[in-house]
Image: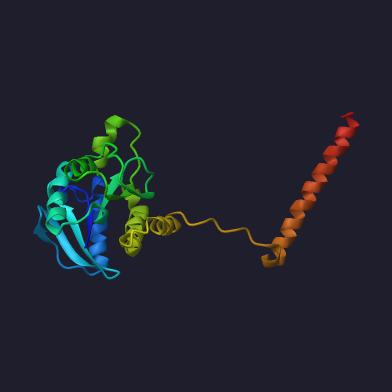
Amino acid sequence: MLLLAGLGNPGPRYANNRHNIGFMVVDEIVRRYGFGAWRGRFRAHVSEGRIGGQKVLCLKPETYMNRSGESLREAVGFFKLELDDLIVFHDELDLAPGKLRVKKGGGHGGHNGLRSIDAHLGPDYWRVRLGIGHPGEKGLVHSYVLSDFAKADGPWLEKLIDVVAQQAPRLVEKDASAFMSHVAQVMTPPRPKPPKPADMKPADLEAKQSTKDAAKKDADKNLEDDKDHGI
């Protein structure tokens, strides 16, 4: 069994906060893969299902962010899971909005949810860091993460949540590199290559040739001017 935990704060007051993006992701995973109904267990809301043949438990702690580790410790202990089987989704100030990184282990970076998990379980679990951007000043961080996403955040936020859920089978397989690569392709698609001459329309070719001719004419004129001035 794998445990996919989204971090956030419970209740409608916090539902659309930046701090709750972890809850948003596991909600979409549960919806997309037809998991069972949410129910109360381990001081959390939990939902069971399967992804790519693997049994998965999605969990949203009801203990509030800074005590997330208490809930996860109960679930990990009950199922006798290794920390390698725990994947935590959380908001990340140090990544631009819409960016994503996956890593195993490491520090908590000041994130109170991770700090609590580290204290109760240790640091050697998987983290999916979901970029929300930084407000610019340390003193603004608290109000920033506990504020709702702005309306302008809607397009990238919906796209990120959708692609993370879509690529969950790669994450379940612990293929972090492929998971990040596919998410990045959706969030930052490559720029289209300029058309080759063979693919260009006659009008485009004429315009391109006219530009070249004009540039050559200007260069020739500048050369004549330089000669006239003894340069």
Image quadrant in which the C terminus is located: top right
In the rendered structure, the answer to whether residue 42 lies left or right of residue 158 reads left
- Residue 163: image location, x then y, percent: 36, 60
Q: Is residue 11 visible?
A: no
Give whichever of 116, 79 is nearer the camera. Answer: 79
Q: Is residue 206 visible?
A: yes
In the rendered structure, the answer to whether residue 204 lies left or right of residue 131 reads right
- Residue 196: image location, x then y, percent: 67, 62
Identified at 72% across, 66% down, the residue is: 202
Q: How many marks?
A: 0
- Residue 212: image location, x then y, percent: 76, 52
Identified at 76% across, 57% down, the residue is: 209
Res 164 quadrant in image: bottom left
In the rendered structure, the answer to whether residue 106 lies left or right of residue 221 reads left
Applied colour scheme: rainbow
Give whichever of 157, 217 is nearer the camera. Answer: 157
Res 111 quadrant in image: top left
Identified at 22% across, 49% down, the residue is: 7
The vertical placement of 205 against 18, above or below, is: below
Give whichever of 46, 192 is nearer the camera. Answer: 46
Give whichever of 58, 202 is nearer the camera. Answer: 58
Image quadrant in which the N terminus is located: bottom left
- Residue 139: image location, x then y, percent: 27, 30
